[in-house]
Image (cartoon, rainbow, N blue to C red):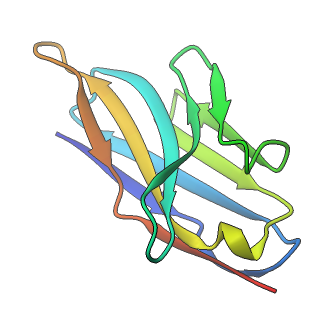
């Protein structure tokens, strides 16, 4: 099993910045992709940004140029630096990890979610 612990959410004014962190622990063999998703009230969960084991990144159009995803493989941690925040960025942000165990198929894990609220 793999556990994900998120931190860094909070309340910020429009134009401000926040940095989210997600640390993975447990029976880790091989972490494939990691990423961040978000879900606003009444909306479906959507992709924010992902990063592969090799460092390739992918961003939602709505956050390109404002958010940066990075990972520290030595700490099994993924980060999301969010700048120039807008009220429409308000959501619960979830960390995602795709893990390949020594035996068996790849598995998906989710964090518990961290609230990000951007006031206008």
Tell me which corner region of the image, top left, top right, bottom left or bottom right, holds residue 9.
bottom right
40 versus 65 height, above or below:
below
| Residue name at image x 34 percent, y 30 percent | 98
**Residue 49, image quadrant:** top right
Would residue 21 be found to the left or right of residue 66 on screen? left
Place of residue 16 in the rendered image (x, y in percent of width and height, measured from the top left): 85, 71
Q: Vertical placement of 33 versus 24: above or below?
A: above
Horizontal placement of 101 versus 103: left or right?
right
Residue 97 located left or right of residue 46: left
Between 27 and 61, the one nearer to me in the picture: 61
Q: Residue placed at 53% from the left, 22% from the top?
A: 52
Q: Residue furthest bottom?
A: 120
Q: From the viewer's perspective, is residue 47 above or below residue 111? A: above
Question: Considering the image in quadrants, where does the C terminus appear?
Answer: bottom right
Horizontal side, residue 42 vs residue 17: left or right: left
User: x, y percentage for residue 112?
Assistant: 34, 63
Quadrant of the drawing holding the N terminus:
top left
Counting labels gives 0
Q: Position of residue 79 (x, y in %)?
A: 61, 46
What residue is shown at x 67% (from left), y 40% (from top)? 69
Is 22 or 26 nearer to us in this picture?
Answer: 22
Indicate whether 43 appears above or below 95.
Answer: below
């Amino acid at each position: 099993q793999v556990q994900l612990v998120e931190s860094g959410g909070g309340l910020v004014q429009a134009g401000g910045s926040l940095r989210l962190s997600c640390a993975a622990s447990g029976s880790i063999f091989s972490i494939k992709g990691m990423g961040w998703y978000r879900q606003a009230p009444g909306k479906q969960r959507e992709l924010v940004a992902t990063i592969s084991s090799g460092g390739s990144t992918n961003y939602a159009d709505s956050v390109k140029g404002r958010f940066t995803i990075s990972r520290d493989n030595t700490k099994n941690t993924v980060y999301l630096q969010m700048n120039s925040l807008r009220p429409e960025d308000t959501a619960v942000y979830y960390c995602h990890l795709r893990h390949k165990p020594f035996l068996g198929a790849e598995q998906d894990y989710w964090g518990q979610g961290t609230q990000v609220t951007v006031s206008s």
